[in-house]
Amino acid sequence: MTPANFQQLANFIWSVADLLRGPYRPPQYERVMLPLTVLRRFDAVLALTKETVLKRYDTLKDKDPQLVERVLNELAKDEDGTPLGFHNHSQLDFRKLKGDPDNIGRHLVDYINGFSENIRKIFERFEFEKEIEKLEEANRLYQVVAQFAEIDLHPRRVDNITMGLVFEDLIRRFNEAANETAGDHFTPREVIRLMVNLLLEPDTQVLTQQGKIVTICDPACGTGGMLAESQNWLRAHNEEATVKVYGQDYNPRSYAVAASDLLIKGHRDSRIDYGNTLTNDQFPDMRFDYLLANPPFGVDWKGEKKEIDRWPNFRGYSGKLPRVNDGALLFLIHMIAKFQPWQKGNRDQPGSRIAIVFNGSPLFTGGAGSGESEIRRWIIEHDWLEAIVALPEQMFYNTGIGTFIWVLSNRKEKHRKGKIQLIDARERWTPMKRSLGNKRRWLDQTVIDEITREHGALTVSKTSKIFDNADFGYRRVTILRPLRLRFQLTQEAKEHYLDTCPELLDAVLAVEEALGAEPYYDWNKVWDKVQKIVKNMPDDVEGWANGAKGTAQKKAFRDAFTKVDPEAEPVIAKHHKIESLDIAALFPGQTRPDELAPDELQALLGMKANGKGKVIEYEADSALKDFENIPLKEDVVSYVRREVLPYVADAWIDRMSLDEQDGGIGKVGCEINFNREFFQYQPPRPLAEIDAELAHVEKRIMDLLREVTE
């Protein structure tokens, strides 16, 4: 059987699953069918040297188990005489299992226990003994095993490449049958093909060289689909290439499937390991040429946080980490840590490429200074982000949300340096004839090829745009507005104030006599009058208008007798001499004329010249505080003058927000907003057209009502 006609064999194995109907629901068939397919393949592969292994086992079975493992793994060989790296020392095989239906359950367990330790670990993760018990209770075990005994999976008939294709096809079918749970362990195949194209196509010239050795890693490999598709691409472009794949997953059954797939294909230099990628990296000292992954969307890393917080950094990244309810970016940091070092012209430092699938959250979640923003900034400032492709919604089995493929590299081509490409493929989908869970759309090969070409050619079009790295950075600047207070000495306010400060009754009465009960819209003038009034009061009262005691009393007095009113005059905080203002120190690096115009004073400082050689600084109203995300490429003052002052003329920049970090330019954030970059304005329809449509609908409704009532 050749790779071209593997489908017949896959269809037959798939048909055997009908025997499970009853004790199993279709989404559960894979619990039995995948382990048995693996067993039958191993049984066929080991048949050539089975007798040799059994004879040697009889002489070694009382020896050290590790010695036995090592010797027998070397004795079990394929048709080329190459050690397989695993063995089975049980007297049983599928032919003998079929010949003893009364003891099928016990014998099948014994047969599995006769495998070498590496195979037993895989079947422990399959938890296959539970399924054997369930099948035996349902009186289905012998029927299924007997059917598998009739399938010829011997390497002379089914080579490793074909067997790998069969197993991949079964994995895909069973995962698609599972619908809503498939997305946890299986990425749609067309998405993987697009990822692999984006990852490998730019290096086609290098990857097709004779004798090429390639290492590929998926740190969240699930059932191994991405690794398998990468191998398929490389085999199609270079049959002579040596491909070493490495994967890790935290789901026991997914790990077992992926590890089995690797052994079925005969990859002895590759590894699939079990463990938590975030806290228990199984490849701590390894670097890879290519990395790709589809980490869980919105994965909670609360369970890992306590351990990670004890580390001096996370995989070499010492910045702020993302929120605990979404650790997707932690997987990307982990993958970046696996970059091969890069130096132009140095074959020992070839650099690496990454492709990873995210939902929308890692693009824009978190404001400036948050963990997500800081990670994005770290990536972009290192010029690692090469491209992002927006995929259609409803592409995945367990979610209908939009998804994005990120492509990163530490060896960007010269024409990509300092650039980021965004490709919008959200509308380039084909509807499925039958939905699979939440998956109702797919990408046909034509679209995959189009996107691959757009990426490779750095195309500029309606669906592909090129940006500078700095285009995605912004300064988070605080915008303030003045406090405006209306003063009025009402009876209610007076009673409330005197309840807390009864000793100031005479002062309050004096102010009331001088100012009356009408409202005043300039607190600054009111306070000047109040100070003059209390200066004529006894010494024990005069103190509250000046000094430390006066500051507290002023606040209490103002809180009691004023209310915010947008019609009132701004409250003055301080007076400054113009020559004492060091504007350059306050706003380093900002573009402005040597002499500030009045509106620039307002925008920069919240100050106003009083015409007497001084400027007035206003007090800010905390309730009116707002924020502006100002692009890094723009001058802060120019932006505020253009985008803020025309709408709120009394606003100004809080210079404290510019002093927070980064040399006085303000808190810097990074976000990538596809909607903003690809938004196309659609003008509303003319009102006359809408009115005519409404009139038509109303007429139809009335006609229908008449038909009912007449």
Image (cartoon, rainbow, N blue to C red):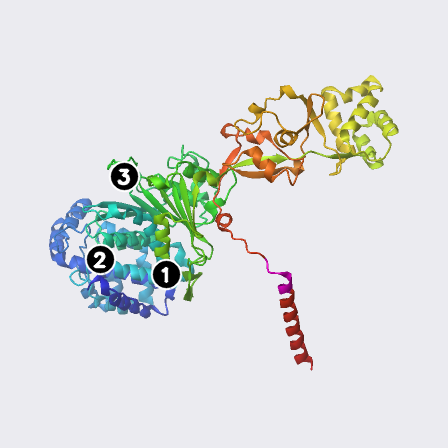
Q: Quick one: SS at disc 1?
A: loop
Residue 146 in the image, given as x and y percentages of width and height: 24, 68
Q: Quick one: SS at disc 2?
A: helix
Distance CA(mark 1)–CA(mark 2): 25 Å
Which label sits in the foreground, 2 or 3?
3
Q: Based on the displayed image, in which of its 4 quarters is residue 653 positioned?
A: top right
In this rendering, the answer to whether 35 lies above or below 629 is below
In this rendering, the answer to whether 207 lies above or below 577 is below
Q: Quadrant of the C terminus?
A: bottom right
Relative to 595, 331 lies left or right? left
In this rendering, the answer to whether 516 lies above or below 328 is above
Query: Given the image, on which type of amino acid does mark 2 rest?
Result: Ile
Which is more toward the observer, 25 or 61? 25
Distance CA(mark 3)–CA(mark 1): 33 Å
Which is more toward the observer, 306 or 425? 425
Residue assigned mark 2: 161
Residue assigned mark 3: 350
Q: Based on the displayed image, in which of its 4 quarters is residue 604 positioned?
A: top right
Residue numbers of the magenta segment: 684-690
Query: Given the image, on which type of amino acid does mark 1 rest?
Result: Asp
Q: Quick one: SS at disc 3?
A: loop
Residue assigned mark 1: 444
